[in-house]
Image (cartoon, helix red, strand yellow):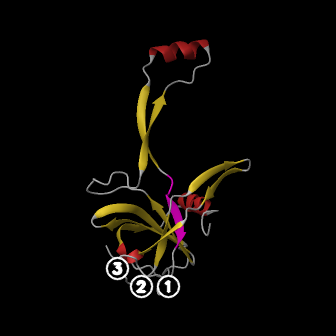
Amino acid sequence: MDFSFTGFEDENITMRISEGVYYFKDEPIYWVEHIEENSDEYVFVYDIHDKKEEKPQKAYRVEEISKTLKGGTYLSNRIKSLIPIKKQYKKVYKEPLFVANVIPSGIGIDTITGRSGKGFFERQREERIATSKGISVKGGDYTGVFITLENVKWNKSYIPLESVIEYYKQTKEGRINV
């Protein structure tokens, strides 16, 4: 799939997200989400869930959810003891390994291909640190590897819902230029 990462045709559209997989020697290495927000461009880079799958997916874990009555009264406790617990499973995506600014064309040179293009520098995994003010994120060190966006195999591109935009803005906060 070919994506052109240029400006928006419609002035009302303020964000576009493209998702794809970065491969090295036919092995899926990263799930990449390229975010274009007004004049800013950045990537969220995730681990791959199972590198042996034919269609790689963003890293996730499966959480078990038990649906039952809350209890707390004589009646609800009695009913709760008679009804079997309903177990459901939910896919929860893992945090990004790192978040990085997209470097404009002409500045970065792809480490593998040697070609110039728009892309990002690979970083080591970010570290979450609990402080008295809450959780902060310490950016990982740069590895020296530059990945151009043209070397990502893009799967889809879409305009997100407002709630998704808020998630990306909150997650980006404090992670860019760390």
Quadrant location of the C terminus in the rendered image: bottom right
Rendered location of residue 7, percent (x, y): 49, 82
Which label was assigned to residue 116?
2
In the rendered structure, which amino acid carries the disc numbered 3? Answer: Thr
Dividing the image into 4 quarters, which one contains the N terminus? Answer: bottom left
For label 2, count other residues whose C-alpha is less than 10 Å away and answer few (under 14), some (14-19) or many (20+). some
Q: Which residue is drawn at 37% across and 82% down?
A: 114
Q: Which mark is residue 113?
A: 3
Q: Where is residue 141 in the image (x, y as percent from the top left)?
A: 55, 65
Q: Which class describes the residues within 10 Å of circle 3: few (<14), some (14-19), or many (20+)?
A: few
Mark 1 or 2, nearer chain start: 1
Residue 27 in the image: above or below residue 135: below
Residue 162 inside the magenta-drawn segment: no
Residue at figure coordinates x 40%, y 78% from the top left: 110
| Element assignment for label 2 | loop
Instruction: Answer with the quarter of the image where residue 109 lies.
Output: bottom left
Q: Nearer the viewer, residue 43 or 37?
A: 43
Earlier residue among tags 1 and 3: 1
Q: Distance between the residues labelled 3 and 2?
A: 9 Å
**Element carrying mark 1:** loop
C-beta proximity under 8 Å, tags 1 and 2: yes
> Which span is picked out in magenta?
95-101
